[in-house]
Amino acid sequence: MYRKKREMLPVEEVDISDIKYTPQHIQAPHLTGFGFMLFTWLMEAPLIGSLITSFLKHKNGITEMLRNTVIPERPMFRPEFPPQDPEKGVVVLDEDRHPIARLEAAMECLPLYDPSRHWNPDPSSNFFYWTIRDFAHAYRSDITTPLIVAERIISAVDEFNGKKPPVPLLISFNADEVRKQAAASTARFRAGNPLSIIDGVFIAIKDDIDCYPHPTKGGTTWFHEVRTVKQDAVCVSRLRSCGVILVGKANMHELGLGTTGNNPNYGTARNPYSFERYTGGSSSGPAALVASGICSAAIGTDGGGSVRIPSSLCGIVGLKTTFARTDMTGSLCDCGTVEVVSPLAATVEDAMLVYAAMAGSSKADRISLNPSPLCFPNLSSSNNLNILLSVRLGKYTEWFNDVSNNDISNKCEDAVNLLSANFGCQIIEITLPELEEMRTAHIVSIGSESLCGLNAYCEERKYSELTLDTRTSLALFRSFSAADYVAAQRLRRRIMYYYMEAFKKVDIIVTPTTGITAPRIPLSSLQYGESNYETSGYLMRFILAGNLLGLPAISVPIGHDKQGLPIGLQLIGRPWSEASILRVAFAVEELCLGHGKRPSHFYDVLKAI
């Protein structure tokens, strides 16, 4: 019997004023323990599994959207961006220059460093993280050395690993290797020849990015057996050339296919603000290492909020760059169309410095995407306030307020209002249609691309050694057809149009980073994992445009809820406009400095010295 198809209007004919916001709800069971084991077995069974996936896709509108809808747009198989106007008040950096030279140029963009701000603070002042420039000052002033700091960091890592239950922030860690790097950095400082402002700064690398000689496991127990690491990923090599001390490979949600950070293989990383709470994922270890003070920064990957979600939940800064802004070579996800490698850092200026060192598109992406020049906001310019005055902030209020806890939307609205009151930023109401369609297009895209990348390395028996969470995700991904993938790319083109139209009216779109603060870790999830799509839906509610459309975005901490858990504000920019979102993020950070709270589990690796 013929089923009548739903026909979408061509995107140019959609009347935005008629759009009604629909709250987003994901319908799927919450599973842990034995029930999760049984459900996974059923999902992987040939006949029963296909019935379950068909039911879940039908209940969540995926089948209707992909197979029973006429989508008139041509597919967009990777983000395609129209030419962008030059950003104002920026310094342009040549991508071909050495990372050290780029760092020197980025340093010129920062306000003058004031050592007294952190080194001689008022005892009653609020909590501050040590910045990269604080470490540089300490090393250059002979207050301490990288080798001394290394010993404190090694002790902190050992202490975390020794907790009951253990809090494994790093999957691969070699204390002697850290000491070796720190000794070399200390020798450079003693000789008066540090390589750069980030020489001697401690940075962790997520376990899906190559960092030689550490294995890359992607949070699994076996991936290093089928894929050998022979050299650093491009982004890691750039950081190493600047004198960074690479601490090791940070814990993560297995293969990046989750938003909480739960990992039964190595233990689940805990949120430094509350060990009973998740860090968020999938860059769980990187976020916890930075939030706890052990590292100044970390490098993660973001294919579905995996940098921004844990940054928000752990009260730090997470920068997601424009798609292809940084060469992905040497990461497990270097063939997808939604993923980037990006920094997590304690402060906006630290994120900016690490980004300056690691950025730079691959040769292939420069040809195919023609990226706008690499730019940094000149925050030291007298014209900075005038530029902020001209910034137009787009806010889709109904979407903005669709959160689990009013503390989130209220705190984020307060931060946006502070931008308007202090800098004159204009707040403009916008509408962004087809958010549910964007979620569908994203899960089909990231799921199909993840499965494709995994198939090349994975024998059938290896799938059974993955966590239950990963196996159920892969079972769902296998149910997507080639036609589903093409339909998702048609949706990508439609949604790109809506955002490009919005950016004709505004410069930056503001949202909460997540629709929920750090969720509790069920005790029953520690051994076998957890599947909770409702929680994932809240965590990813505002995230997906950055990934499906490849737009730059940044999460900035702006306060805490009534339970003392961090809240992040997200700024989404036009393609290639990292400088613009960094400028506004820096302003937000300055306005919210008085709202900082010390994490419950924090290591002050400089003050104790």
Image (cartoon, rainbow, N blue to C red):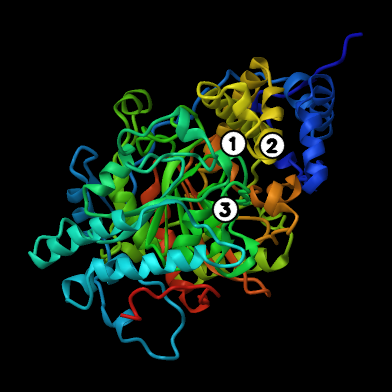
Of marks 1 and 2, which one's residue comes earlier in the chain? 2
Q: Quadrant of the N terminus?
A: top right
Of marks 1 and 3, which one's residue comes earlier in the chain? 3
Q: Nearer the viewer, residue 375 or 560?
A: 560
Instruction: Give the residue furthest to the right.
Output: 1
Q: CA distance from mark 1 to mark 2?
A: 9 Å
The residue where tag 1 is placed is 498
Quarter occupied by residue 564: bottom right
Quarter occupied by residue 129: bottom left
Q: Quadrant of the C terminus?
A: bottom left
Q: Nearer the viewer, residue 127 or 269?
A: 269
The residue where tag 3 is placed is 309
The residue where tag 2 is placed is 434
Q: Residue at x 68, y 23 (%)?
A: 478
Q: Residue at x 55, y 22 (%)?
A: 455
Residue 555 visible, this angle: no
Q: Nearer the viewer, residue 88 or 375?
A: 375
Quarter occupied by residue 324: top left
Q: Are marks 3 and 2 in contact (CB under 8 Å)?
A: no
